[in-house]
Amino acid sequence: MSRKYADYKRGEREARWIATVQFVILLAAILVLLGVIRSAFFFQVVVAGPSMEPTLHDRYIIFLDRQRSPQRQDVVVVRDPQRSHVFWVKRLIAFEGETVVFVRDQDESGWFYHIYIYRGDTRILLLHEPYLDEPTRHVRHHGHQPERYYFLIGSGEIFVLGDHRDISYDSRASLPIVKNRDFFGRVWIVAEKNSFFWRLLSGFGGQEAGT
């Protein structure tokens, strides 16, 4: 083997080694960039519990949009005001300066509550909730259910409810009215359990959020 050919082969090996190192560095940079984008803009969450049914079921995987401001009746993830490591998936019902008024009514199925939103003395709307399987039947988890009940949403606060109202831990009683600073993101993409997208994402885990 000539010296020239040996030098050629050595140079070829070095070139392949350099190309491999460059590829590994580029791949690592892409993964880091994707991680930054994922945490800053789109955050993966695993739903834990049944109280957002029928909209979200246990173990669904959801992606959050953390950039756009939420709108009324968006499904959102919030941080528990009293336990910063705990997250909840709920539906945003009212904003600061508004009053949520539960008014009891009755039909052939029994007692239920209409939900009105007021700003000051002006009624803004009667909440229409096609996403519920069952109407709201209580404003307290235990004891007497009043004819009318008010929640005044203070400065920097939001009011959230679960879609499965009979079992939901939310702003009516158990979960305090949430501060804006505890808003974590609005639901953007939903992967139903055992769907192709869910199987693809389930190996990556994600922050659990109770319902």
Image (cartoon, rainbow, N blue to C red):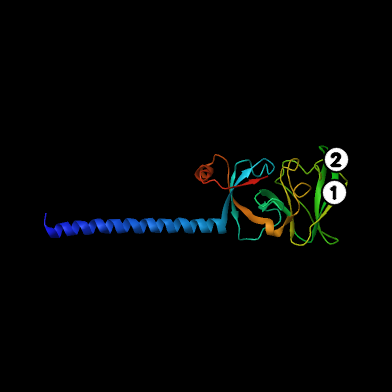
Q: Which mark is residue 57?
A: none
Question: Quick one: label 2, few (<14), some, or many (20+) residues within 10 Å?
Answer: few
Residue 194 image position (x, y, % from top left) = 54, 39
- Judging depth in this view, the residue of 82 and 40 nearest the camera is 82
> In the displayed structure, does residue 19 sit left or right of residue 45?
left
The residue drawn where x is 88% and y is 46% is 147
Q: Quadrant of residue 112?
A: top right
> In the displayed structure, does residue 163 sit left or right of residue 11?
right
Q: Spatial distance from mark 2 to mark 1, Cα to Cα?
A: 17 Å
Q: Secondary structure at mark 2?
A: loop
Q: Quadrant of the N terminus?
A: bottom left
Residue that carries the numbered disc 1 in the rendered image: 103
- Judging depth in this view, the residue of 21 and 142 nearest the camera is 21
Q: Which mark is residue 143?
A: 2
The residue drawn where x is 57% and y is 53% is 43
Question: Considering only order in the chain, which callout, 1 or 2, is on the residue closer to the N terminus?
Answer: 1
Residue 65 image position (x, y, % from top left) = 60, 56
> In the displayed structure, does residue 110 sit left or right of residue 35?
right
What's the amino acid at mark 2?
A: Gly
Task: Note whether residue 96 is visible.
Answer: yes
What's the amino acid at mark 1?
A: Val
